[in-house]
Amino acid sequence: MSIRFTAKARRGMVALTIAAGLAVGVAGCSGGGDDKKPQTSASASRTGGSDPSTQDGESDEPIAELKGSSGLLLQITSATRDAGGFVTVNGNLKNDGSKRITIPPAVRGDETEILRHGMSLGGATLVDAASKKRYYVLRDTDGRPLTTTGFSSLQPGESLAVFVQFPAPPTKTTEVTFQLPTFASAPIQISG
């Protein structure tokens, strides 16, 4: 009786494995035949192979430019309010100088939870002056900041597409100030 039970259990596990494999395969198909590009994950990072290009609601023209130390330049290309209750700020971090620049560790901020997860833009904030509130970078359930991570330096002329996600201010708030340690602050408009 025990051999028969083991054989049935084995067949059940094989069937379950095949079903799971088919489900993953079907989920990976585009399904509708539309040619839309897949959306990038909010936790995409430079080390994860993500190379985001212009995203929805983002233009090639920056809506703000923040100058940093040693020739670093942060060009913000969009700040979009999403239905999920957050704001995604997209941009490009560029070495505008003539020498290789190591990104200052201060851009990570000083919160212990964020520091544990390596280099990021976790020190960024949005300031809503009208409501007298400051919004900090969102984190996932493991405490990782929802921002570009895994970068360390930029060569002369090199640019890195970056994003940062924040809790959304009230819908009546359309202008906030973007701040990142070691960079100048700049007002930005939230769309969406």
Image (cartoon, rainbow, N blue to C red):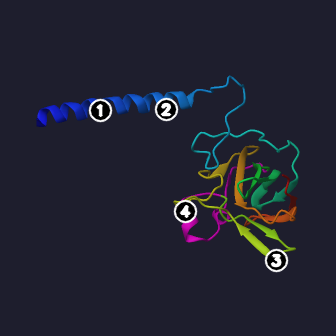
Q: Label 1 amino acid?
A: Gly
Contact between marks 1 and 2 (CB within 8 A): the answer is: no
Which residue is label 3 attached to? Answer: 132
Nearer to us in this view, 148 or 175: 175
Label 2 sits on residue = 24
Secondary structure, mark 4, is loop
Tell which circle, 4 or 2, labels the residue nearer the N-terminal end.
2
- For marks 3 and 1, give the CA distance: 59 Å
Left or right: residue 102 compared with residue 159? left
Give the alpha-carbon distance from disc 4 to disc 3, as whole Å.
26 Å
> Is residue 116 highlighted in magenta?
yes
Gap in Å between the C-alphas at discs 4 and 2? 28 Å
Residue 61 versus residue 190: which sits nearer the camera? 190
Question: Label 3: how many residues lie within 10 Å, few (<14), some (14-19) or many (20+)?
Answer: few
Q: Which mark is residue 12?
A: 1
> Badge 1 local density, few (<14 within 10 Å), some, or many (20+)?
few
The amino acid marked with disc number 4 is Gly
x then y, percent, for residue 178:
80, 63
Pointer 4 and pointer 2: residues touching (CB < 8 Å)? no
| Residue 62, above or below 122 | above
Q: Quadrant of the N terminus?
A: top left
Estimate the x, y position of residue 169 in percent, counting from the top left: 78, 65
Numbered range of the magenta stretch: 97-120
Judging from the image, what secondary structure is the residue with disc 2 in?
helix
- N-terminal of the two: label 1 or label 4? 1
The label nearer to you, 2 versus 3, is 2
Query: Along the polypeptide, which appears first: circle 2 or circle 3?
Result: 2
The numbered dot on residue 33 is: none
Residue position for label 4: 143
